[in-house]
Image (tube, grey):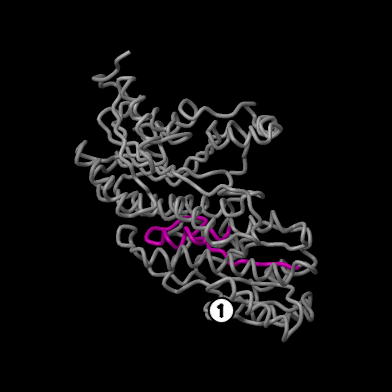
Amino acid sequence: MDANLFGRVVVVTGGDLPLVAGLAAGLAGSGAIVVTLDADTLGSRPAAEAAFAAVAAEYGAVHGVVHAAVDPIAYERVPMHEVDDARWDAVWEQTLRRALFVLQAGHTQMRSAGGAFVFVGSPVGMAGAAELAPYAAAMEGVRVLAKSAARQWGADGIRVNVLAPAPEHVPAGVASGELALSPPALGGAGDPADDLAPVAAWLLSDDAHFVTGVTVPADGGVWMAG
Amino acid sequence: MVTGGRTDRALDGRTAIVTGAGQGVGRGIALALAAAGANVVIAARRATTGEPVAEEIRARGDEAVCIETDCTVRADMEACVAATVGRYGALEIVVHNAFKGGRAHRLEDLDLDLWDENSRTAAWASYYSAQIAYPHLAAAGDHGRLILITSPAGVEASVGIPAYGPVKAAQRALAKSLAREWGPLGVTVNCIAPVAETPALAYAFEERPELKTRVEMRTALRRIGDAEADIGGVAVFLASRAGGYVTGQTIVCDGGSFMGL
């Protein structure tokens, strides 16, 4: 793997997901100094700012952020008429707030020297799925929040992009067929470390310095809607 | 002209709730649905704005009533839906249009007060609207319609109002997911992404006169939409039999500006 992130400090959230653990391992293989943060350090802006500042103090300036933290309750399949306010809050509201706090805390660290975010998106949000409406809403909210940040922070040298994995990487057990998507052209959902991490590494690297606000489906050729 | 009593209109006999119908796009949609024959409930946060719209509709010979409703409050939406069904016997069409929170800001300065306005009125109120109307939409079967009013910013974000795009995107994902979930019942769920003359837009044009020219010049039809004729007509289409095979979609209704779909 190219060492295109050699010595760069990359913060990874949501490392308890197998997908993200693989991404983190792959980014380390690209030479990055990978520091993982638990979702419980992202529950408020002060907590997120403190967590990012602590990373910078210990490892050096933060260059990149891979944000994937989602409460596992989001993957539980519940018909809309049985969703209660606690579930909607946990899935929609807290997912969006964590993403906002990660962006704000990352911006604090990157605003002088620039940097890049990669958000891990979801084909469920892009295509919609029955009994996963709160999760779909949250993931599309996060995807467009990334675009908002990309539009405002380009002038600060900060880029924000989204990596969308194959449906099989969503723990809710959705398949491409359920989302009315064709099976992967390249065959299989891909290995997070070998197949997806190089895409994340490229998005975080200087080679992608002119790319921001986009969603890259690293899904073996499932999503081809644009 | 009295039009009441006609039975040849696209939405004769149907009942619709429109949130945020006291002004702007919501008012235009309410007028259009009523003109197409629907009984329309003006669900406005303040009766002082909603009641005049109901009166305007009744003065045309169509049917409407105002029910003061804060759609971000579950109990309010429950009461609105119950009163609607109590008065008209059924509920086939729900249009969630209400929104508050479009003040320009920097993302790094976005605080939870402004975020909450966006989240509560767009996302939470969409969830409440969908869930509370569900038993009635399900009973309506292939007459059941949920329409969420989103924005092109829900696809491509907005540089000036970063909190706005995400909550409008959430509505698009809700529409896609609920379209799949409720499709077997015959119920359709769609979004309209409008650009129309509204008090908010008029204020923005007043503050920045050059903005009106800029918006018109990037619009293929070279004019800002009319809330009733241009946006309301699309809502009538989606609510009618003619729109019955369209679901999970966002109809961008902006005179030909955003063309990214």
- Camera-side residue: A157 or A193? A157
How many dots with numbers?
A: 1
Is residue B80 depicted above or below B111 in this figure?
A: above
Q: Residues within 10 Å of mark 1 (few under 14, many from 20)?
A: some
Q: Amino acid at mark 1?
A: Thr
Specify whether residue A119 is painted magenta.
yes
- As drawn, which residue projects farthest toward the top? B1
Q: Is residue B243 left or right of residue B138?
A: right
Of the 4 image quadrants, the one containing the N terminus of chain A is bottom right
Specify whether residue A42 is painted magenta.
no
Residue A21 is drawn in which quadrant? bottom right
Q: Which residue sits at x=46%, y=42%?
A: B149
Q: Is residue B111 left or right of residue A172?
A: right
Q: Which residue sits at x=69%, y=31%?
A: B209
- As drawn, which residue projects farthest toward the bottom? A58
Q: Position of residue A223 (x, y in %)?
A: 57, 57
Q: Start and end of the magenta stretch?
A: A115-143
Is residue B80 depicted above or below A191 in this figure?
A: above
Is residue A166 depicted above or below B53 in this figure?
A: below
Q: Position of residue B150 (x, y in %)?
A: 50, 45
Q: Position of residue B184 (x, y in %)?
A: 31, 50
- As drawn, which residue projects farthest toward the front? B48
SS for tag 1?
helix
Q: Position of residue B39 (x, y in %)?
A: 28, 31
- The residue under label 1 is A41
Residue A156 is drawn in which quadrant? bottom right
